[in-house]
Amino acid sequence: MKGLCIGHASYDITIPVENFPKENSKNRVGTTIECGGGPACNAAYLLAKWGMDISFAGVVGADFYGDKVEAELKSIGMDITYLEKQAGKKTTTSYVIATTSTGKRTILTSRDQELHYSGKEIPLTPDVILVDGEELEVSKNVLLKNKNAISVLDAGRVRDSTVQLGSLVTYLICSKDFAEEYTKETIDLDHIETLITIYQKLKADFQTNVIITLEEAGCFTKLEDYEILPSIKVEAQDSTGAGDIFHGAFTYFISHNYSLRTSLLLANVTGALSVTRIGSRNSMPTLEEVLEEGKRHAFLS
């Protein structure tokens, strides 16, 4: 099975702190954690780690951080034929403050506005495609040429590219923020009717399978009926990359003939396990860990 992930690649520098720093203060921290990042690139990394034949298409600068991103993807056995390194451009960098007492993170991203993937065609026939909306033209071309592939959109926030791609994929998986901003409705987890209303609006507009992620609460979709599929309780330290990891895990399971319910439950487990560790790439659990935890919580028979 051949997979292709298209979208954002960055280099992340994570700074763990117990409490979020006060403005106009000096703070000494311990070891920082550095690794590649970006929604589609993180998903690709997880899929490669779990043994899938994965290619990644995206862009970095021909610089120090671009070299580090390239080396990291090579180290996991990923095909990086379609990773562009553009001379004179700076690789996108993200500075992540991980507040370990709450498990929350604050991200500051520096991106060269001229940094865009220049390729328009990718001569692959993938069985599975994941896009994050970062590279609209090449993503659209690949999706339209491979309509029989299983395809997933990581819709983190509302922008023209994610809206355009939403109706071209098999699974539109959107964040709570995307769902609320797009529909101009508010989610109240104590009232499932609010989720149903938002789901129905998204379904009517995009005409595809819709899933709404709800962070530690799990995710929402329609199976036999409307349902919140739960996550597992964990001691969170850093939520960086958890959504990306959820999308990668879902893509793995749905493309390996797991049911939609089981794929979502195991993706919830994968994302939850990742927040117990600091960083994104190094927080990714193994496939064996996820399956074992899934069995423990009766998500697998």
Image (tube, grey):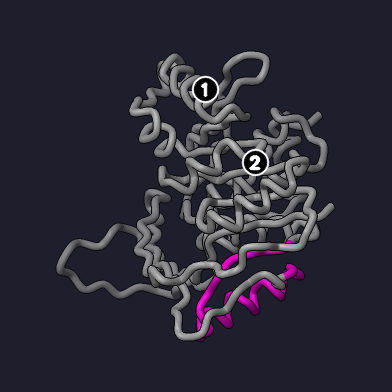
Query: Picture coordinates of residue 245 (x, y %)?
Result: 60, 51
What is the quadrant of the C terminus in the image? Answer: top right
Does residue 131 appear left or right of residue 47 in this picture?
A: left
Q: Residue at x 44, y 18 (%)?
A: 197
Residue linked to disc 1: 204
Residue in the picture at 82% in, 36% down: 257
For residue 156, above or below residue 222: below
Q: Amino acid at mark 1?
A: Ala
Amino acid identity at mark 2:
Ala
Instruction: Give the residues in magenta.
Output: 55-79
On the image, the x and y values in percent for residue 5 come to 66, 57
Question: At 55% from the left edge and 24% from the top edge, which residue is drawn?
Answer: 228
Return the x and y of residue 199 as percentages of the image width and height. Answer: 50, 23
In this rendering, position of residue 24 left or right of residue 104 = left
Structural crowding at the residue carrying mark 2, measured as other residues with C-alpha within 10 Å and reported as few (<14), some (14–19) or many (≥20): many
Horizontal side of 198 relative to 143 (left or right) equals: left
- Residue that carries the numbered disc 2 in the rendered image: 267
In the rendered image, is residue 291 in sight? no
User: Does 91 sit left or right of 138 as displayed?
Assistant: left
Residue 236, above or below 277: above
Q: Quadrant of residue 89?
A: bottom left
Residue furthest to the right in view is: 1
- 202 vs 297, nearest the viewer: 202
Which percent across, then down, holds residue 277? Answer: 54, 57
Queried whether the magenta region covers residue 56, the answer comes back as yes
Q: Nearer the viewer, mark 2 or mark 1?
A: 1
Depth check, front residue: 253 or 88: 88
Q: Is residue 169 above or below residue 226?
A: below
